[in-house]
Image (cartoon, rainbow, N blue to C red):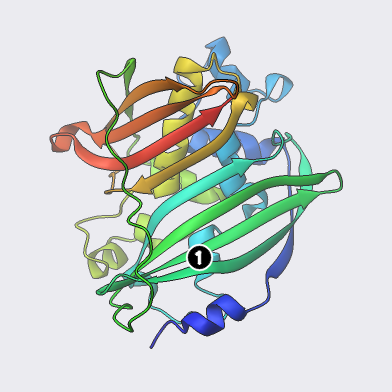
């Protein structure tokens, strides 16, 4: 069996050290489409070092460390073909705002292994902390085709009821043809996003956009549209990768706001590909804010 669930869950956390600075933050923001129009003051918050704010989803690439999916495949108890792997979902919990420059210790471990029959799902948790305490906790759900069927726990479905009523906002974001090539410079060098031959072996017509790139695009849209661009208001952000996006497509981002008494609120989000009849890209997406 390519996944030894008992070994994966029993393994000690893997620790590492990461560091980042303004150029890393700027490159990440450009990789998710920031900077258009280039002189817009709202965009300069993401691109100009003298005004720089950090979109919380930067935490998924901070320090140019291996993203949760790639890191998860090198943890004990896991031995699978990268071409059979998809990023199934991502959750990020912010304990404090992410600084423009910083250094942190990370700790990664497998916290759940689910048997979906034809596939397995790993949940890899990465925690980051600096000298002042915890910074963020990220959970990556890794879907491995053909790795299920050993009779393990099936786990939660992860699907939520759709939002009620009409969205409070709908925006569209055009994905550049070279968006994946730019985004991968922040650390995710999975050939699925650049190499046509590898993409074909994985079952795709051409390289696909990183799920975490779409994840960042959607969070920026919500922050700019409903949170007045105040990145520090985001406290929790989770999604299920329901489909793929391709470079050159247009993403339609729908938003529903739900207030939570005494603790800020949440924005429910749906992301689809306009050119493919609104094919789902992100689903069960929630931004928690204060």
171 above or below 88?
Answer: above
Rendering coords of residue 166 (x, y %): 25, 18
11 above or below 216?
Answer: below
Q: Which residue is mark 1?
A: 70
Q: Residue at x 68, y 71 (%)?
A: 14
**Observer-nearest of 164 and 55:** 164
Rendering coords of residue 284 (x, y %): 35, 41
Q: Residue at x 45, y 24 (%)?
A: 222
**Observer-nearest of 25 and 286:** 286
Residue 188 can be seen in this image? no
Mark 1, Cα crowd under 10 Å, few <14 / some 14-19 / many 20+, is some
Choose top left, top right, bottom left or bottom right for residue 50: top right
| Circle 1 SS class | helix
Choose top left, top right, bottom left or bottom right for residue 29: top right
Rendering coords of residue 41 (x, y %): 57, 11
Q: Residue at x 55, y 45 (%)?
A: 92
Residue furthest to the right in view is 131
158 above or below 96?
Answer: below
Rendering coords of residue 288 (x, y %): 52, 31
Give the side of residue 18 with respect to residue 86, left or right: right
Residue 114 can be seen in this image? yes
**Observer-nearest of 88 and 48:** 88
What is the quadrant of the N terminus in the image? bottom left
Give the side of residue 70 with respect to residue 130, left or right: left
């Amino acid at each position: 069996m390519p996944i030894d669930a008992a070994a994966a869950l029993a393994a000690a956390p893997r620790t590492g050290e990461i560091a980042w600075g303004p150029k890393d933050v700027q490159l990440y923001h450009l990789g998710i489409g920031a900077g258009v129009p280039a002189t817009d003051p709202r965009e300069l918050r993401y691109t100009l070092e003298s005004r720089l704010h950090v979109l919380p989803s930067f935490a998924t690439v901070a320090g140019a460390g291996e993203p949760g999916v790639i890191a998860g495949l090198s943890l004990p108890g896991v031995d699978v073909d990268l071409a059979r792997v998809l990023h199934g979902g991502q959750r990020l919990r912010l304990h404090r705002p992410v600084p423009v420059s910083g250094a942190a210790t990370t700790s990664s471990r497998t916290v759940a292994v689910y048997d979906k029959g034809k596939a397995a799902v790993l949940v890899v948790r990465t925690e980051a902390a600096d000298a002042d305490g915890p910074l963020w906790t990220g959970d990556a759900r890794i879907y491995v085709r053909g790795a299920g069927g050993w009779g393990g726990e099936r786990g939660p479905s992860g699907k939520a009821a759709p939002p009620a009523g009409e969205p409070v906002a709908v925006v569209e974001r055009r994905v550049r043809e070279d968006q994946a090539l730019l985004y991968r410079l922040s650390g995710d060098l999975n050939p699925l996003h650049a190499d046509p031959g590898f993409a074909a072996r994985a079952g795709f017509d051409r390289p696909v956009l990183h799920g975490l790139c779409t994840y960042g695009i959607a969070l920026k849209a919500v922050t700019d549209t409903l949170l007045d661009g105040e990145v520090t208001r985001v406290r929790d952000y989770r999604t299920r990768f329901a489909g793929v996006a391709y470079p050159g497509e247009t993403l339609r981002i729908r938003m529903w706001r739900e207030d939570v008494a005494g603790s800020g609120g949440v924005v429910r989000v749906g992301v689809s590909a306009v050119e493919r009849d609104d094919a789902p890209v992100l689903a069960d997406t929630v931004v928690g804010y204060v």
